[in-house]
Image (spheres, rainbow, N blue to C red):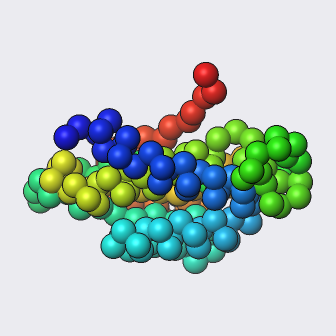
């Protein structure tokens, strides 16, 4: 089975996650519910969410089935905050928080990274090394969440990091 097949098997789940986070947006440095909900989903997968003492957002680790003592740690990062925008889309899952909206895809980023966690925990044999999943708060505000995240030590054990962004077709 390849990653595309695994992703397609999780299509309804990823849509459900995206719609939940779209309907419950939170502004930068205020992502308490978002952090809590992500943590709950990670726990359901058998993962241990690690919370920062003075910062919203969280991270978890997935140890690969092909890991060796000299294996690397690769981080995958998704942003979780929303913007101060009133939503007028009429979607059945539109924002329930007046004046706040996921207007640039962070709800999708969160859902994708959670789905990645779900696939990797189900198939650790596909991973050599460790994957650190970072759910970054406050990407939209300067100085943003990346600075706070680094100050909290999120990058100290990471050899390489990937962030991603989506675009509408």
Q: Quadrant of the N terminus?
A: top left
Judge from the rendering whether residue 130 lies leftward or rightward of residue 58; answer left or right: left
Q: Quadrant of residue 104?
A: top right
- Residue at image location 88% in from the left, 58% down from the top: 98
Is residue 143 in view?
Answer: no
- Residue at image location 31% in from the left, 44% down from the top: 6
- Compare residues 131 and 16 and report the one nearer the observer: 16
Q: Quadrant of residue 65?
A: bottom left
- Compare residues 64 and 146 and report the one nearer the observer: 64
- Compare residues 66 and 105 and report the one nearer the observer: 105
Residue at the extreme bottom of the image, as rendered: 53
Please provide percent x and percent y for residue 157: 34, 59
Q: Quadrant of the C terminus?
A: top right
Is residue 123 in view?
Answer: yes
Q: Quadrant of residue 11?
A: top left
- Residue at image location 15% in from the left, 53% down from the top: 125
Judge from the rendering whether residue 111 lies leftward or rightward of residue 69; answer left or right: right
Please provide percent x and percent y for residue 35: 59, 68
Image position of 71 with respect to 36: above or below: above
- Compare residues 142 and 85 and report the one nearer the observer: 85
Judge from the rendering whether residue 165 lies leftward or rightward of residue 98; answer left or right: left
Please provide percent x and percent y for residue 25: 73, 57
Please provide percent x and percent y for residue 60: 40, 65
- Residue at image location 74% in from the left, 50% down from the top: 92
């Amino acid at each position: 089975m390849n990653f595309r097949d695994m992703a397609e098997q999780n299509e309804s789940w990823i849509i459900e996650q995206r719609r939940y986070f779209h309907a419950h947006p939170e502004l930068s440095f205020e992502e308490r519910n978002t952090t809590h909900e992500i943590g709950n989903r990670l726990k359901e997968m058998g993962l241990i969410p690690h919370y920062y003492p003075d910062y919203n957002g969280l991270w978890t680790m997935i140890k690969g089935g092909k890991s060796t003592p000299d294996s690397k740690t690769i981080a995958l990062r998704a942003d979780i905050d929303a913007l101060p925008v009133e939503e007028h889309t009429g979607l059945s899952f539109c924002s329930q928080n007046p004046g706040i909206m996921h207007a640039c895809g962070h709800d999708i980023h969160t859902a994708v990274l959670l789905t990645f966690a779900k696939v990797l925990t189900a198939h650790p044999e596909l991973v050599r090394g460790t994957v650190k999943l970072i759910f970054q708060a406050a990407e939209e505000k300067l100085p943003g969440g990346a600075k706070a995240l680094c100050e909290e030590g999120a990058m100290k054990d990471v050899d390489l990091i990937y962030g991603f962004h989506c675009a509408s077709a």
